Amino acid sequence: MTTKRRFIGLAGSLALLAVTVQAHAEGVVLKALMEDVPETQIIEGMLPEFEKQTGIKVEFEKIGYADMHDKLVSQLIAPKSYYNLLEVDFLWAGEFPAAGWLTDLQPLAKKSSFDMGAFIPSTVDLLGNSSKGLYAVPMYNYSMGLIYRKDLLQDAKLGAAYQQANGTALKAPATLDEYVQLSKFMKQHANIAGAAMQGQRGDPNSMEFSNYLFAAGGAYQDASGKVTLDNAAGKKALDLYLDNIKNGAQTGALSATLDDTQRLMCSGQAFSFVTYWWMLPQLDNAEKCPSVAGKLALATMPGGHGESGGWGWGIPKNISSEEQQAAWTFIQWVQSKPVVAARALLGHAPVRADAYQDPAVLAKYPYYKVAADVVASGKSFPIFPYSAQYEDVLGTQLSMAAGGQVTADVALKDAADGLTKLLKK
Amino acid sequence: MLADSVKVPNSCLRQSDETTPQPRQRRWRDRFDRQWQTGWAFALPGLLVLAIVMGFPLVYSAVLSFSSYTLMRPHVLPLVGLDNFASVLSDPGFWAATWLTVKYSIITVAGEFVLGLGIALMLNRTLKMRPLYFALLTIPMAMSPVSVALIWRMLLQPNLGIANHLLNQAGLPSIDWLGSAETAFWSMAAIDIWQQMSFVVLILAAGLSALPRDPYEAAEIDGARGWQQFWYITLPMLRPVAAITVVIQLINELRTYDLPYVLTKGGPGTSTEVLSFFAYRRAFLGLSLNEGSAAAFVLLLIILGMTVVFFALLERRRA
Amino acid sequence: MRKFGLHLGLLIACALIILPPLWALRTSLVPESMSYSTDWFPSLTLDNYRSLFERNHFLTYYANSLIVACGSVLLAMPFATATGYAFARFRTGGRLARFVVLATQMLPPVALVLPAFALLRGAGLSNSLTGLVIVYAALNLPFLTWILMGFFEGIPADLEWAAMTDGTSAWGAFWRIVLPISLPGLAAAAVLGFILSWNEFLFALVLSGPSTATIPVALAALQTSNGIQIGKVSAGVVLAIVPLMIGSIFVQRFFVKGLTFGSVK
């Protein structure tokens, strides 16, 4: 604890020092704009080690997600970027390379024989990487799965009521239909919200809906790139989503964000929660959520596929080659096997396949077995330059349909058309 | 009737630009007008600062709105004339957002002004606990719009927040403050009024305190009652300050951005999507700085139009 | 009896206005996990404040905000006062100048922020407090000018005219007669300018660096994709209110009815 505090003091004074150090070009200081979340804090704690090994100082400037994009863009379009190491969200992973702001890491990887095969393939793909270029190295994932109250599934009274109402036993859902049915049942009979849903327009509801889409066997685009959002599977997904948000979700779901649903789940007022799989340790915590600690379980989204998201490391083009080299050294170090294993033991959500099989990690977090499946089976929201805008377009349609402003069919068609239009842009 | 018997000295009344002044006033008006060089000497430094610091961004933004500059293709040329404006104006979402913004601004400004004026009047007549009242009443404006939105989101959280908790304890059902298209608009307006009211109180209290005492003393002698004093003396003398307060608040409300961004992100549906948010979607999310700038300038023209109309109405009434 | 009615009205107004900040104060003193509890004080703690200062370098941001807000007001007021006076008395530039000046205020900040950033970069002032002070001064100049214009227009010109007839220059009349009378207006404008700078977010976000950020930027960082740390946000809000409360107690002394006119007579 004190070492962390000491380090933060050091980082603070380094930040002031860095302004002058930069002018001298004595040694490269890596400056990154990061989100202030546990993942960042875990790495921050290990930075002194990196500095000892390589002599390169690293500074993290922490800011909220919503503002990161705008602040980064203003630096990336300038002649020289202040930030020489980038944390890139998968939603920007289409925009940044298309705008020409990121260095292709392929040559660097080849020269230093960096093994990209160590990463779970879905995490590499969702960052927009392809044979055309490697622009972001996976950092951590936020794939989504289902967290639910296993104690309620084991409740005898509820079991009997369910048997009577639906003719089948009360158990964890295997398909999307079963899940929504279960959610509505819980709302009626267990006196709690069947699902804590994030209905706020934009990122919250479009990410949540993506889970429903993939779980129903739908997809945003087919292999050829044609938009398939409004096919039969898409329709089914939207109907089930709307059904759940109207009949199974908490009051005020249409304005809820992760903050709201997380707190709701923590207070024991919801049966289930489609969310990042690593919310489990945060909720299953006797100190923070005494009402639900020990009663929660994690599962892959019923239907087999959930929405995957993740962050990656990138290197801007508009910096010196020494800075680029220093940034690459850091990326190699922070995503190497031993460092990732150490991060995992502190609660990191790994993107390296071997981290999920590390015995020490599994001993501490047994549910990582399920997590590995969640991450591997996850599918991605369309990644292209206008992903962020599409989130807003889709989110608006979903919100309008959920509020009754338009019918589901119209919303689905407009959402599909919106995607086609943006893809063509 | 009363206006005849209460002779408010002309020199204490605010002079209109448009009414025909009395000979004495015309003389000093001419005198000031003749010294136009002095006027420019006073004004030039400030205008220069504005021109240098704000001029460049303004002009650049204007140029962008005629250009094909996007973050994907960051080149100003070729200029595309009015294409961006056409694209923005032909978007049905734009007109919906415009109507919503105008409606929102009128409601909030009216609410702030009426409540703010009422409080300022009460404040003006007290002496004893004034510092305390003042300190308390100005708290909301010390909070940044983002903070206001976050704190109110906490209060209005539908399942866990204190507002619904209190309602439930009183036997009333919970309200879906921000999650229902109908209530979200009004909740946001109420929160905005709550915050901006203290601005209005501050400026109107200052304005009221700067009013001369003579007309009131004369009115007392003539037997004018409280509300008559208010209607025939206070209001007319307060007019310049009040008018400017309304204009400034109108401009602020038409540009509202932080509140919907944090509270509802323009939702549910499009029930709180104001114009600045629409512009933001184009410029930042859509990476189209050209269209975002065009939308911003259309907003500027709307605001300018409403301001000019408001002033024209005000000056006509004064005659 | 009337006095009682007045005080009652003011008390009700104050109650409605301060209940939300009061709840914020309460939330700042309660552990994060209990922020949404409906009890007043489930458990008291200073952790939120401690964490703000230790982990989020709040003291630096607080100092930056104070420097930038005071600096921009000190910079803007002389210009705004002079220009406002010119608009009010001399009608400099006619209606056109007034509205053009105000027009710079009518553009949403979103449209201005990237060009402003490019401008500061060119001047070598990006990521600096000086740059932010200059930008804020220019940003607030139109509003301040208009407010002061309104106050000046409300002051009858007789006194200045009388002085000028006696041979005083316009500048002398302005300095010795108008300014002392317009103290309420000056105070109100200064407070407004301070508040606008204190609460401004978008320009601070883009134009400042890690060591020059201001309070709104610091508070925005507490909205993480892992949830909103409302306890710390509340603590930050409570701390941010303090300077203005102190300032307003000081400033309201200028708002005593008839103070200025009585003395001038």
Image (spheres, rainbow, N blue to C red):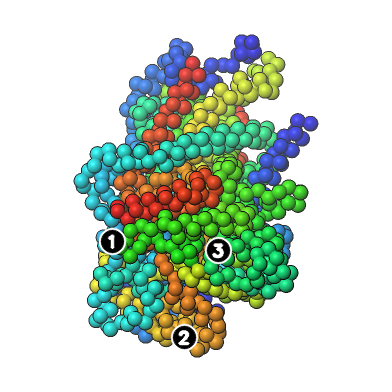
Q: What is the distance, in whole Å, between disc 3 and disc 2 at their CAs?
A: 32 Å
Q: Which mark is residue A177?
A: 3
Q: Amino acid at mark 3?
A: Asp
Residue on which disc 2 sits:
A357
In-front residue for pair C126/A375: A375
Using the image, determine if residue A224 lies above or below residue A282. Answer: above
- Observer-side mark, 1 or 2, equals 2
Q: Residue at x 48, y 74 (%)?
A: A374
Q: Amino acid at mark 2?
A: Gln
Q: Residue at x 24, y 39 (%)?
A: B81
In the current view of this chain or complex, which residue is farthest to the left? B78
- The chain identifier of the residue carrying mark 1 reads A
**Quadrant location, the N terminus of chain B:** top right
Pointer 3 or 2: first along the chain: 3
* Residues at marks 3 and 2 on the same chain: yes
* Residues at marks 3 and 1 on the same chain: yes
In the current view of this chain or complex, which residue is farthest to the right? C1
SS under mark 1: helix
What is the x, y in percent for residue A424? 30, 53
Q: What is the distance, in whole Å, between disc 3 and disc 1 at their CAs?
A: 39 Å
Q: Amino acid at mark 1?
A: Ala
Residue on which disc 1 sits:
A98
Crowd class of label 1 (few under 14; some 14 to 19; many from 20; radius 10 Å) = some
Crowd class of label 2 (few under 14; some 14 to 19; many from 20; radius 10 Å) = some
SS under mark 2: helix
Q: Where is residue B200, by image quadrant?
A: top right
Q: Is residue A176 visible?
A: yes
Q: Where is residue A46, by image quadrant?
A: bottom left
In-front residue for pair C238/C264: C238
- Observer-side mark, 3 or 2, equals 3
- Observer-side mark, 3 or 1, equals 3
